Image: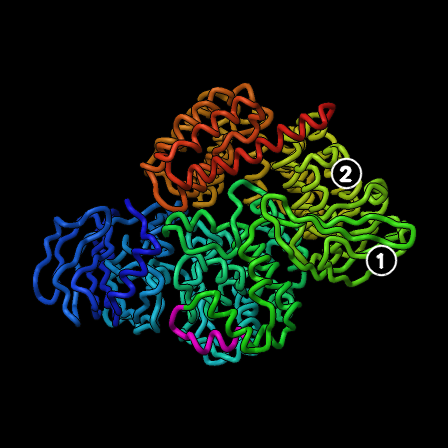
């Protein structure tokens, strides 16, 4: 199916002006299809164009009262001829419900058999719901009518009113891009509130009602505080009427910023104990999506190459506003440890790209660049820009941009013009180096006789002259800090800092976007000094430096592991503990280092750490999860499941039980019967997904083949079940058992594009990649697949990222063969 190109979009935008959509959906036709009738009023400056619609059956199309031959529908496009200056198009179709998180997704809750729907129109999924001119710069108001079972509620972009049993009408919206149109329908549990004249609500599945009742106050509080701060920052009131936050099942992304009705993955309605970091992450997600109501929804990009600006801006504002306006203040620690690391990896892959790319790709290919560069690097760059311009100029430009382009479309160049009008100078050169040139600089420190020499080196394949506003931190043996602000605008800059300090950390406050390298003296003292450094952001900068230097074969992974072991007994941040354990799992154990004895050493440190964590604390939960993931102590794992020797204050709730069960399954200490018993205990949709992951982890030929068939051949598998099977399949302790599937991955993964579409294709290809097969032979298999242009772009991108990681692992092993 062809994807819309930028040239095609420009041609159609020049030809058409869309005045309104009226969409009528019938959700009472059964569990396979729904009825969709769309009335579009538009002007045309050309006699021909085309419509986007992807139906199960296209029943009829009428243009200005005359029938259009539905047989002309080809690959989701219907040619329109004989257009008048003013036109009315009526399209009647039967549409398929989806199970991949796009289009109109239908989910049946395993807990009670209730059915829930939500619409995800992002990128090119809208035509799976209603007929439209599907591109971001053809905005129009929408009126939606819905027929649903009478016991359901209906929410959408406009205020919904039930005009008769099961019949709903939604108020006309402000002009929206097609990819923002949403619908949430089902027997959802709803809690209402209000703030500053804005009606608010949160909804979830009925099986999560108790959890939502418990969590709603925190969600509402963050929302209200954020509305106040955004109104203050932007000087422009929220324009979309009601504000609903729907926590929906089997959602692919973290959330989607649909105006007036934001959708979130419902794992954010916490049914079990979570860490403070996870609560903080939910708060940032709430703030991120709210930021989009102005930047993205009120003002929308003209083409997908400016999607980075929507996401980078929302990412930056989420961390800034959550820190300034809510009780969650660890946001920049999370950014340093998690988000920035995600972006740094993306910026060093073969698939790296500029933050602000040229508009040369088609819509689907643009999704490939929806990554850590678009989010984290862009946010870091905007943070640098705010410091470079000063907050007054930065915000003045943003305010003018929103006001002058409200309910329309704009480009990055339009925003730059507003910043320039507000007083910014030199933005063209700044943007060229930071936004239009890919790659990441390396910043290192060298001790001299009188101070510190800071060095900046751009990557050879992507040269640039990027100025860095940052802080250099120095720490003595006790961890006491001194700092010096520096503008690194040349390849070398002298810094007045005592060269005898134990540890010197460039960019100690994590203010810029760069790879940080520590000098040899600092590295030698890290195990003693790092645990004493109080600032969590600085500790994150140091850990990122170690992680990246190891991946670049500049540092022995055994030294990184030693620092890990030295730090964990003293670390007080649950974000830091979770990040370090995740890094060990994903990059060290079985990848850069042998699985043993390193797994056992790390498990021992984590298990011992439990005795010194505060009872019932977030830190205790993070440490306990890490211990469970890494231990091979079957007695301990089974004991915790039965309530034996559980650390005081630790709740063995549903999700922790499943983590224990997953580890036991991977160790081969339980089988299908025990997993089935756990599922009977937790017969929720969440439980069903956990059970799929556990079954895939079992070290038997039968279990692996069952999981493989789900991944590679099951077109009806729900997206979360598919992801769970991928996540449970590979295990560094099961290399011999899974060895035959390495070849099979490269033989079969391309075929999954015929089973599924959109996001889920690339995501499953990435999760199923044989990351523990560290072998030169696999390099050849991956390279051959990437070179095959008949394979879907999303699959090739996922395999390319896996190949980059594989090459790094081989290089690290070759550089440090004794590790």
* SS category of the residue bearing label 1: strand
Asked whether 223 or 122 is in front, the reply is 122
Residue displayed at 51% across by 74% down? 418
Query: In the rendered view of the protein, which quadrant contains the C terminus?
Result: top right
Question: Residue 124 colored magenta?
Answer: no
The quarter holding residue 326 reads: bottom right
In the rendered image, the vertical position of residue 615 relative to residue 384, given as above or below: above
Figure check: 250 above or below 407: above
Q: Is residue 670 left or right of residue 168?
A: right
Tag 2 and tag 1, C-beta contact below 8 Å: no
Image coordinates of residue 276 in percent, x first then y, are: 64, 56
Q: Is residue 283 visible?
A: no
Residue at left offset 72%, top offset 51%: 456
Tag 2's secondary structure? helix
Magenta stretch: give its range.
397-409
Q: Which class describes the residues within 10 Å of circle 1: few (<14), some (14-19), or many (20+)?
A: some
- The residue shown at (22%, 63%) is 24
Decide which of tag 2 and tag 1 comes sooner along the chain.
1
Q: Quick one: 518 or 571, which is closer to the camera?
A: 518
Give the vertical position of 257 relative to 420 (above or below).
Answer: above
Circle on res. 565? 2
Q: Residue 305, position in %: x, y?
A: 44, 56
Asked if one can make out residue 427 in the rendered structure from this viewpoint, the answer is: yes
Per the image, is 399 magenta? yes
Q: Quadrant of the N terminus?
A: top left
The extreme left residue here reads 66
Side (left or right) of 453 relative to 80 = right
- From the viewer's perspective, tell me whether residue 485 is left or right of residue 437: right
Q: Which residue is mark 1?
A: 481
Label 2 vs label 1, nearer the camera: 1
């Amino acid at each position: 199916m062809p994807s819309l190109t930028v040239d095609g979009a420009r041609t159609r935008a020049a030809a058409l002006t869309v005045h309104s959509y009226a969409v009528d959906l019938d959700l009472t036709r059964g569990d396979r299809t729904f009825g969709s009738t769309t009335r579009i009023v538009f002007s045309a400056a050309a006699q021909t164009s085309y419509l986007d619609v992807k139906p199960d059956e296209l029943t009829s199309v009428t243009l200005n009262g005359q029938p259009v031959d539905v047989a002309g529908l080809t690959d989701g496009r219907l040619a329109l001829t004989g257009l008048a200056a003013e036109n009315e198009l009526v399209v009647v179709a039967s549409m398929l419900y989806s199970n991949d998180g796009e289009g109109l997704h239908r989910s049946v809750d395993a807990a009670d058999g209730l059915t829930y729907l939500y619409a995800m129109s992002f990128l090119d999924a809208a035509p799976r719901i209603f007929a439209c001119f599907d591109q971001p710069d053809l905005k129009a108001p929408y009126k939606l009518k819905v027929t649903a079972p009478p016991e359901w509620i209906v929410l959408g972009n406009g205020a919904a009113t039930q005009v008769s049993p099961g019949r709903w009408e939604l108020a006309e919206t402000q002009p929206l891009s097609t990819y923002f149109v949403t619908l949430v329908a089902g027997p959802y549990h709803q809690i209402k509130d209000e703030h500053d004249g804005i009606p608010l609500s949160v909804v979830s599945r009925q099986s999560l009602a108790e959890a939502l009742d418990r969590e709603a106050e925190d969600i509402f509080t963050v929302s209200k505080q954020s509305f106040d701060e955004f109104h203050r920052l932007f000087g422009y009131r929220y324009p979309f009427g009601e504000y609903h936050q729907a926590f929906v099942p089997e959602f692919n992304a973290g959330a989607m910023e649909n105006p007036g009705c934001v959708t979130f993955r419902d794992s954010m309605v916490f049914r079990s104990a979570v860490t403070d970091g996870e609560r903080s992450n939910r708060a940032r997600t709430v703030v991120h999506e709210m930021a989009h109501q102005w930047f993205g929804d009120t003002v929308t990009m003209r083409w997908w190459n400016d999607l980075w600006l929507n996401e980078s801006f929302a990412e930056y504002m989420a961390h800034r506003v959550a820190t300034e306006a809510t009780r969650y203040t660890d946001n920049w620690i999370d950014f340093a440890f998690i988000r920035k690391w995600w972006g740094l990896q993306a910026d060093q892959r073969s698939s790296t790209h500029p933050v602000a790319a040229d508009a040369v790709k088609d819509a689907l290919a643009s999704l490939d660049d929806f990554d850590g560069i678009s989010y984290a690097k862009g946010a870091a760059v905007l943070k640098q820009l705010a410091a470079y311009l000063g907050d007054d100029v930065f915000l003045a430009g943003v305010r003018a941009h929103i006001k002058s382009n409200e309910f329309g479309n704009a480009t990055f160049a339009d925003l730059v013009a507003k910043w320039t009008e507000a007083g910014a100078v030199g933005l063209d050169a700044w943007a060229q180096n930071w936004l239009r040139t890919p790659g990441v600089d390396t910043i290192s420190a060298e001790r001299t006789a009188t101070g510190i020499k800071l060095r900046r080196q751009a990557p050879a394949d992507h040269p640039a002259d990027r100025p860095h506003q940052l802080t250099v931190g120095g720490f003595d043996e006790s961890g006491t800090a001194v700092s010096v602000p520096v503008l690194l605008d040349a390849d070398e800059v002298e810094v007045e800092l005592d060269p005898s300090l134990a540890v010197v950390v460039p960019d100690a406050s994590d203010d810029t976007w760069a790879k940080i390298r520590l000098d040899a003296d600092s590295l030698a003292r890290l195990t003693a000094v790092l645990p004493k450094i109080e600032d969590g952001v600085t500790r994150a900068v140091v850990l990122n430096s170690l992680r990246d230097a190891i991946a670049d074969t500049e540092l022995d992974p055994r030294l990184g592991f030693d620092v890990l072991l030295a730090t964990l007994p003293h670390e007080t941040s649950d974000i830091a503990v979770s990040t370090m354990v995740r890094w060990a799992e994903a990059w060290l154990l079985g990848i850069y280092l042998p699985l043993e004895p390193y797994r056992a050493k790390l498990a021992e440190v984590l298990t011992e750490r439990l005795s010194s964590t505060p009872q019932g604390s977030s830190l205790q939960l993070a440490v306990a999860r890490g211990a469970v993931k890494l231990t091979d102590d079957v007695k301990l794992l089974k004991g915790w499941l039965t309530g034996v020797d559980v650390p005081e204050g630790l709740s063995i709730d549903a999700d922790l039980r499943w983590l224990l069960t997953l580890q036991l399954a991977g160790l081969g200490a339980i089988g299908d019967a025990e997993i089935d018993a756990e599922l009977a205990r937790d017969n929720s949709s969440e439980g069903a997904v956990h059970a799929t992951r556990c079954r895939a982890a079992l070290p038997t030929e039968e279990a692996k083949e069952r999981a493989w068939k789900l991944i590679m051949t099951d077109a009806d598998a729900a997206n979360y079940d598919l992801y769970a099977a991928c996540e449970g399949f590979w295990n560094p302790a099961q290399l011999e058992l899974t060895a035959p599937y390495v070849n099979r991955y490269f033989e079969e993964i391309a075929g999954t594009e015929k089973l599924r579409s959109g996001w889920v294709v690339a995501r499953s290809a990435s999760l199923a990649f044989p990351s523990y097969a560290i072998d030169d032979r696999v390099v050849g298999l991956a390279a051959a697949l990437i070179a095959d242009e008949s394979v879907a772009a999303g699959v090739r991108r996922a395999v390319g990222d896996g190949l980059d990681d594989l090459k790094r692992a081989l290089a690290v092993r070759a550089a440090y063969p004794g590790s």
